[in-house]
Image: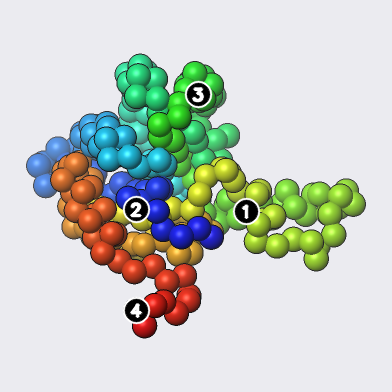
Amino acid sequence: MHDALKPPHHIAVIMDGNGRWARARGLPRGLGHRAGAQAVRRIVEACCDVGVRVLTLYAFSWENRDRPAAEIRELMGLLEEFIRRETPTLLANQVRLRTIGRMEELSADVVASLRRVEAQTAQGARMTLALALGYGGRQEIVDAARRLAERARQGLLRPEQIDEAMFAQQLYAPDLPDPDLLIRTSGEQRLSNFLLWQSSYTELYVTPKLWPDFTKEDLLDAIAEYERRERRFGRVTAQA
Ligand code: IPE
Ligand code: IPE
Ligand code: MG
């Protein structure tokens, strides 16, 4: 566990409210997702500007797979469009793209384009953009447990050797630090299976703003609020 770096080193976002944004305008949900994709562009750029080093975006959850097939198709289409249109910008801004989640749940084409952009942007040193796709925090923990169990079965590992650090090494992106700040838009005060392991000491920030309406100013407000927080990590601090 590292002490807080300011501004937050790693921001994670539950981008919620696309459907409500569309409904408020009498539009189909798909147009809400399209507006949400614009907000993604805005916030990636803003995070680059303010010096955030890792941005993890919850784009499609394990449970979102139970949504209507037509909505899933629209989301995947937008994802492909995003990859196609944004790759030059990612390269120009030295942003490295990563993915976390059970990627085998996505179509082979989408996975192939994501893998291609991951390889193309692998040298991006300014910021890492991690897209959570087919992602569930519990599923990630189960996958890690399976890998450790398999190594124990092969006799490569004794169960008593397993500690938090070794467990964390089996998560989807073991090299990324835990999020410092977790933002959720649209007012819901829950994690919805996002980064369960990694968020144990993350500062939570919920805003009523719907994701398509979320701006750079809103991001700066969240960061300012984060900077006012006192992170204690269970300890007693000098001020106490
Ligand atoms: C978030 O917006 C985007 C995804 C979950 C993919 P929603 O689609 O959940 O929007 P609401 O919650 O219905 O408003
Ligand atoms: C969380 O939002 C998932 C993403 C933003 C991708 P949901 O809209 O799926 O969460 P619930 O259903 O309100 O908990
Ligand atoms: Mg939602």
- Choose between 76 and 209: the one closer to the eye: 209
Sequence-wise first label, 3 or 4: 3
Q: Identify the secondary structure beneath mark 1.
A: helix
Reading the image, the residue beneath label 3 is 123
Count residues near mark 2 (Cα–Cα under 10 Å), then give few for <14, some for 14-19, many for 20+.
Answer: few
Q: Nearer the viewer, residue 149 or 200?
A: 200
Q: Amino acid at mark 4?
A: Gln
CA gap, disc 4 to disc 2?
A: 19 Å
In the displayed structure, would residue 234 be above or below residue 71?
Answer: below
The first of marks 4 and 2 along the sequence is 2
- Percent position (x, y) of residue 105? 54, 36
Question: In this rendering, does residue 69 appear at all?
Answer: no
**Residue corresponding to mark 2:** 6
Q: Is residue 163 above or below residue 9?
A: below
User: For the residues marked 4 and 1, what is the alpha-carbon distance in whole angstroms?
Assistant: 32 Å
Look at the numbered discs 2 and 3 and tell me whether their residues touch, using CB distance below 8 Å.
no
Image point 81% across, 49% down: which residue?
151
- Give the label, 3 or 4, closer to the camera: 4
First of labels 3, 1 by sequence position: 3
Q: Residues within 10 Å of mark 1 (few under 14, many from 20)?
A: some
Which mark lies nearer to you, 2 or 3?
2
Foreground of the two, 34 or 100: 100
Residue position for label 1: 168
Q: Which disc is residue 199 wearing?
A: none
Q: Residues within 10 Å of mark 4 (few under 14, many from 20)?
A: few
